Image (spheres, rainbow, N blue to C red):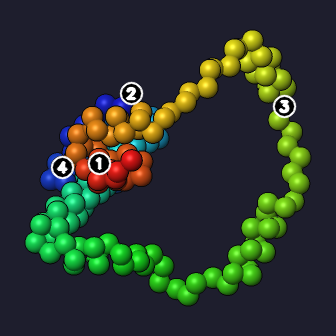
Amino acid sequence: MLQVRQYKAKDCAHRQDGVCWDKCSISLSQPDITQKLTERIDDLKQRIATWGKRIRRYTERSTRFNQNRLFQSDQKRLYKSLERPIVSGTGPAPNQADTVAFWRSLWSEPVNHNEGPWTEVVASQCASITPMDPVIITPDDVAEAVRRALNWKSPGLDGRYHYWLKGFKM
């Protein structure tokens, strides 16, 4: 497990042989410099990912807040803003014939995979497993789960909050 180290730009020390970080105890003359640099790079990547997630959460919260406020003040304007298509690309749309030809060339060609002997071992190990009984989910089960869910907790994979799902009638 990587050890988390505190680093600030003012703590950086400059030397004749290059830049090193006092807080990270990295020096270019050390024999294990590659490992320490890899750890440092991984630490910085984790920090970048953390900040990206934090910014994404803030953006989603801000959007949600603004939509709720707009819903209370002017519902018509909210629904119009939700109906607008989201523009994702800046260039022209691809030609439909080219797109169909591209995917048809990928998916219509038969592929012969050489899986190796490990698949036979896994298949023989899984042969003794009894299959699970089928799970039947009724509309009443879904209605009960939605009824018990809290309104503004984290949305599911579809990105919809329970508040909006509760408005649907069975």
Residue position for label 4:
8
Q: Are marks 4 and 2 in contact (CB under 8 Å)?
A: no
- Tell me which numbered mark, 3 or 2, is placed earlier along the sequence: 2
- Seen from the viewer's position, the closer of residues 164 and 120 is 164
**Foreground tag (3 vs 2):** 3
- At horizontal 27% and vertical 34% (from top left) the residue drawn is 148
In the picture, the disc for residue 1 is: 2
Q: Which mark is nearer the camera, 3 or 4?
A: 3
Is 36 situated above or below 97? above
Kind of element beneath mark 4: loop
Label 3 vs label 1, nearer the camera: 1
Q: Earlier in the sequence, mark 3 or mark 4?
A: 4
Query: Is residue 73 at least partly visible in the picture?
Result: yes
Q: Which residue is mark 3?
A: 116
**Residue located beneath label 1 in the image:** 166
Q: Foreground residue, 93 or 35?
A: 93
Q: CA distance from mark 3 to mark 4?
A: 50 Å
Would residue 22 be visible to someone looking at this image? no
Residue type for callout 1: Lys
